[in-house]
Image (cartoon, rainbow, N blue to C red):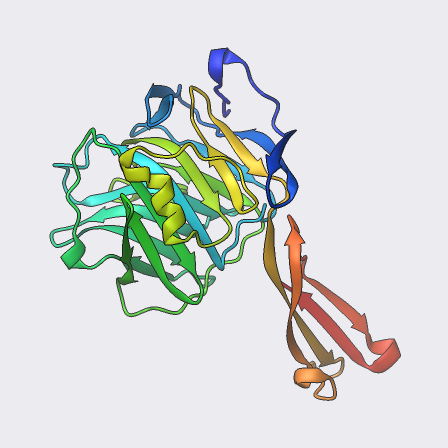
Amino acid sequence: MKKSFLLGGLVLTAGLLFLGVNQASGILLFSSEVFEMDTEPTYVSGQFGKAFKVGQNDVPNYTFKDYEGLNPNQGTIEVWVKPDDWQNAPNGYWEILSVVNTDGQDVMEFRRGKDNNYDVMQFIAYKPNGGFQAWRNTIEDNFTWVDGTWYHLAVSWSQTQSPIVHVNGVEYELVPAYSETTWDIRDFDGGKVYLGQRGNESVRKNNYFNHAGRATFDEVRVSNKIRSHSEIVASYNNGNGTLLTMDDDTLWLAHFDSNLYLNVNSMVTAEKWLMREVRKCDTMAFDTTHPNDGDQDFKIGDYRNYTCGNRYQEQCINDGTADSYYS
């Protein structure tokens, strides 16, 4: 059974709504949720107040429903990280943040990777067919980490460009780690976000490489848009950091000030596309008398915490065609 640990042993009921002032919309709605884990959390001094130390056996995760605004086509992860054993450790992976769908399949992953040649930041998007696309900074940009030192890490992804990583306010454009460069991220309808651990349980438990972050985390922010270079530099603030607040583009925000609260934006919007197929009932061939020869893609517009369910609608009695709608 999973346990929710909070300050003083008091558990805040998930789903409580709060009102916050926002210059753009006047009022911002967000709820306070909780990272869950099976072990007792450890809090240490952070960039602001306390921070959350994730060890080898700690598996903090948050379960989200539908999309909750998480945009597979673009977004940004920002976090302060203080490594515990990155400096002299052998080859492997150190997870920052990863996402799986409701079936436990990988969706995306932000991590540090090290082998005999590289010591880099990596971003991985997992494809519907089980493959993946991996990006990393170049060998010329290999990093040198010092345990016990705070680093501000950020990654921005987009279906139209290579991911971009920031380390302490410096921008690095990632390059494909392999030949695959096509953006085709696995669809999801709910799932889990893991901090400092690989979300895919079978890989986490059985893979040769260690997938724990083995680090301390503070000020985690996930946005449903690409944060600009100036915004990330402002968050880094010359190494002093900036205490982040919820805004219209913030999806999830955690301060870890001696608790595992996670603020969740209740009004996040994101672009949504709908695919419509019009087929003949007898042959199931596309009905070319309809626009785009019956194979239509169109933008719904902004949506608020909305996931389009796939459906098949027969209209054979009326006009001899059947419609399929899917997101």
Image quadrant assignment for residue 324: bottom right
The quarter of the picture where the C terminus appears is: bottom right
Residue under the point 85% across and 81% down: 319
Relative to 229, say whether 313 is above or below.
below
For this view, does 199 lie left or right of residue 46? right
Of residues 205 and 132, the one drawn nearer to the viewer in this rendering: 132
Position in image of residue 27 (x %, y %): 65, 38
Image spot of residue 240 (x, y percent): 30, 32
Asked if one can make out residue 104 in the rendered structure from this viewpoint, the answer is no
Task: Quadrant for residue 241, please give it.
Answer: top left
Count of number-bearing discs: 0
Q: Is residue 271 visible?
A: yes
For the view shown, which residue lies furthest in the front direction? 23
Residue situated in front as seen by the camera: 81 or 295:
81
Pick the front one: 145 or 112? 145
Left or right: 139 as drawn, with respect to 175: left
**Within the image, what quadrant is residue 202 found in?**
top left
**Against 60, is 45 above or below?**
above
| Relative vertical location of residue 124 with respect to residue 202 in this rendering, above or below | below
Q: Position of residue 204 (x, y in %)?
A: 34, 41
Is the residue 156 above or below the residue 1 in the image?
below
Query: What residue lies at 12% left-to-right and 54% top-to-bottom?
Result: 117
